[in-house]
Image (cartoon, rainbow, N blue to C red):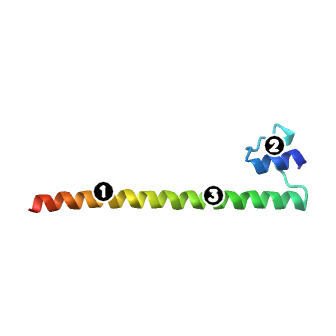
Amino acid sequence: MTTAARMNLQRGIPEDRRFEHTTYTAESALDRLVLARVEARRLIIDKQNYDNMVAAAAEDIAKAAEKELDKLLKDFK
């Protein structure tokens, strides 16, 4: 992998094998290290996004449940 390819990989540019500087094939230990670090960073970001989505969904469900409960209590009185 060229130095430019390593830089593009770390910047998040998608792989496109038609171009030399976006072909991310590991050829050395440094290339494997860079690929592993980029993959780890992507996993951390994906986990964080998932946690944020779950928290937002839980908040929406709690609001809807509270609204429904208020409606039922008003009907009960």
Q: Quadrant of residue 23?
A: top right
Residue at screen point 86% across, 57% down: 31
Alpha carbon separation for disc pair 3 and 1: 29 Å
Q: Secondary structure at mark 3?
A: helix
Q: Quadrant of residue 75?
A: bottom left
Tag 3 near tag 1, CB within 8 Å: no
Alpha carbon separation for disc pair 3 and 2: 22 Å
Quick one: label 1 or label 2, which is nearer the N terminus? 2
Total marks shown come to 3
Where is mark 1, residue-wise?
A: 64
Residue at screen point 40% across, 61% down: 58
Image position, residue 62 (x, y; %): 34, 61
Quick one: label 3 or label 2, which is nearer the N terminus? 2
Where is mark 3, residue-wise?
A: 45
Mark 3 crowd level (few <14, some 14–19, many ≥20, 10 Å Cα): few
Image position, residue 73 (x, y; %): 15, 62
Looking at numbered disc 2 in the image, what kind of residue is underneath it? Answer: Thr
Q: Secondary structure at mark 2?
A: helix
Q: Secondary structure at mark 1?
A: helix
Answer left or right for 56 relative to 13: left
Image position, residue 34 (x, y; %): 81, 58
Where is mark 2, residue-wise?
A: 22
Residue at screen point 39% across, 59% down: 59
Answer left or right for 43 relative to 75: right
Position of residue 10 relative to residue 62, above or below, is above
Mark 2 crowd level (few <14, some 14–19, many ≥20, 10 Å Cα): many
Residue at screen point 89% across, 62% down: 29
